[in-house]
Amino acid sequence: MRKLSILIACCFVSFNIISAADRISKVEGNLNSQEDFRVASLFKDHMVLQRGMPVPVWGNAAAGAIVTIDFADLKFKKVVGTDGKWSLKLNSLSASFEPKVMTITSSKNQNEIVIADIVIGDVWICSGQSNMQFGINGAPEVKALFPSAKNIRSFTVQNTVAFEPQDSCDGEWISEQPNSAVAFAFAYFLEKEVNVPIGIIMASWGSSSLEAWMPRELTASVPHFKVMMEEFDDDKVTQSKIKKILAASKPWTKEDDIFLRRQTNILFNAMMNPLIPYACSGLAWYQGERNAQSMHGMVKEPWYSRNSGILAYGNTLKEWVKMYRNLWDRENMQFQIVMLPGYEGVLDSGPSKNSNNPNAHSWAWMRESQLEVLDLPHTSVVNTIDLGDAKNIHPTDKLPIGERLALLARANVLKEKIEAYGPVYRKVKNEGNTLVVHFDHVNQLKTIDGKAPREFWLSDESNKWVQGQAIIKGKTIEISSSEIAKPVYIRYAFTGKPDVNLVNEENLPAYPFRTDEFKP
């Protein structure tokens, strides 16, 4: 028997509940001083500003001071509040490769902040765990893009944790691609088609759970997260150990690094909160392996697997998306979720230990949970059902993921009239001993190898599944089996690592689905 092999990590938790409206007022060290004059961490030389929408700029200054921003031949002014905070919005900007300079001054401070080499284009936050962090050198196809890459800049948030939501983070904008195979491939294919500067903000950490990136406010809508936070608040031993690690000199030991990542909430506090509300096109999220260590979640042992589990992940993900949109104050902020690819590991909790059985507790169920995010508008899921490695949760085939992220961004954010999806299940009709499946996002169904479509499973009310024989008929698939006289339900690509070959005219793979409502 094999258990899912997952890297682990998470984050920590803050002591006080902080409203979304108060987040910009929480700062590190003496940065809360009303005499401090500064701009938020992301506003540095070589940065990329988002085109096509108002751009928030914020920081600290003396109470009552007038902060003036000179940028693109325009002046913007703001009176600083009594809390020493200022925030204003630049007008919507047009894309530009021409480097620009921003100058920020305060009427009560002799210094000025000058930010040089600013370009305007599309900005994306790329976040998640180890497969988002996966380096370019580990993906040969992506590394081969280096010579032809251009107009890509990146900001990588330093990996750390904090007890309270922070306003500042460590990192610098650089005029080159991020060291993430997925993020670089995404940026590369997006820039190639839209021809504007691309800015990638990397905020990811290997083996972190979804809960690691959740603000404390979500305790109000996610019951298991409320329990996790309460348990952490009562765990003085863990709090003391985290404080000791943070106080020690770096680099951390591997053991300490992993321990920090295995907590909850504190990655959000230190690495995501400082980015809010930086203007961006959206957020690309590649995470889920950590939460796939159990089906029902909140297991007691090992303690670092205490999270949503597979079945609660979908609802948790939706609440997370809604909260981020609230914090950014953007209802239409785009979220692009990368589906977990093929991997044949299974959990011991299932009725079958065979990863090729659709009843096994495999990543098929996590993919179904990830697809639940589509209940929300302005979301998409990158289909990776044809990718992955049977034995390795860190597959090297990252280039197609970047290509598909770029397609979705062009279709959903830039509103290009392109096909960015593979075939999506729409309905099934029962025609005697045959089930006929109809799809959306298809003009022509085909297989990549010219053979019959694979990985269609049939069942009646018994919940016993057999492989069906599938035939392409125009835009539909007809499935039958000599083993089942009256099939009722279909599962497609619903195993750990299915051997799929069904695509549309754009060679994009069909999304996995099931029509039954059996409970795992």
Image (spheres, helix red, strand yellow):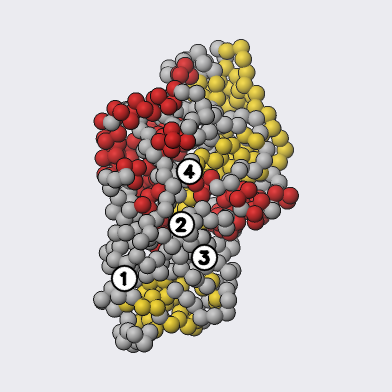
Q: Residues within 10 Å of mark 1 (few under 14, many from 20)?
A: some
Residue at point 27%, 36% (across, down): 231
Give the residue number, with chain letter if any, for mark 2: 340
Structural distance between the alpha carbons of marks 1 and 3 = 23 Å
* Mark in front: 1 vs 4: 4
Kind of residue indicated by mark 1: Asp
* Mark in front: 4 vs 2: 4
Q: Secondary structure at mark 4?
A: loop
* Mark in front: 1 vs 2: 2
Is residue 161 something that shows in the picture? yes
Which one is earlier in the sequence, the residue at label 3 or at label 4? 4
Relative to residue 153, is residue 482 depicted above or below? below
Q: Which mark is residue 386?
A: 3
Give the residue number, with chain letter if any, for mark 1: 516
Quick one: quadrant of the C terminus?
Answer: bottom left
Which one is earlier in the sequence, the residue at label 4 or at label 2? 4
Give the residue number, with chain letter if any, for mark 4: 206
Q: Return the residue nearer the eye: 490 or 380.
A: 490
Which one is earlier in the sequence, the residue at label 1 or at label 4? 4
Q: Residues within 10 Å of mark 3 (few under 14, many from 20)?
A: many
Residue at point 26%, 35% (across, down): 230
Q: Residues within 10 Å of mark 4 (few under 14, many from 20)?
A: many
